[in-house]
Image (cartoon, grey):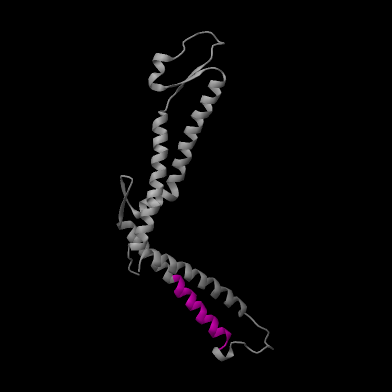
Amino acid sequence: MTITEALAEIKTINKRLEKKTGAVGQYLARDSRVRDPLEKDGGSADWIARERQAIWDLEKRIISIRTAIQRVNLTTSCTVNGTSRTLAEWLTWRREVSAGQQKFLSLLINGIRNVRAQVQKEGGRVLALASASAEVNTSSDPKAPPDVVVNVDERDLLEAQENLEQTLGELDGKLSLLNATTTIEV
């Protein structure tokens, strides 16, 4: 079975589990004066025992499927945007790292934009670090507009942001393809 099929089976099992657990709750107890509605199937107590076993078996199946997927994810490599990692590493990066990287790059870019807008409003200039030493205004006049030196290469930040978005897009496509074509043993 492919990973895609396995994930679909897990969804189906979860729906079945929800129905089974809800059904068991209806037969936990009854008025002793009322006839057992499941008498023909061995009685409510036997039916509940069978359903509990079925629930346990379904839960065990989920564990087996997830473990098989993890096993494959730990051993299958994938190269995305020039970086090679196992599927498990890519999934961890996407879940736990990429959002922080996006937020950090946006914070830096927006911070520079805000500084630029403020300085330009005051009549000053924003200088790149490389050119700052040659161009900086060294006037001691306190009323002179400020020159602000940006300590980060803005082009590099924009390229990093674009590279990150490209990596995320490419990763989603490759993960979908790998999930559809990679088989697992359950």
Splitting the image into 4 quarters, where does residue 57 fall? bottom left
Expressed as whole percent of the image width and height from the top left, the position of residue 133 reads 40, 15
Specify whether 100 is left or right of 73. right
Residue drawn at (51%, 33%) of the image = 110
Q: Is residue 138 above or below residue 17?
A: above
Q: Which quarter of the figure is the N terminus placed in?
A: bottom left
Between 165 and 183, the residue placed more toward the observer is 165
Q: Is residue 56 magenta?
A: yes
Between 3 and 50, the residue placed more toward the observer is 3
Dominant secondary structure of the residues highlighted in magenta in the image? helix
Q: Is residue 162 above or below residue 49?
A: above
Expressed as whole percent of the image width and height from the top left, the position of residue 62 reads 43, 68
- The magenta stretch is 42-59
Residue reaching furthest to the bottom = 40
Between 92 and 112, the residue placed more toward the observer is 112
Residue drawn at (30%, 54%) of the image = 77
Q: Which quarter of the figure is the C terminus placed in?
A: bottom left
Residue drawn at (68%, 88%) of the image = 34
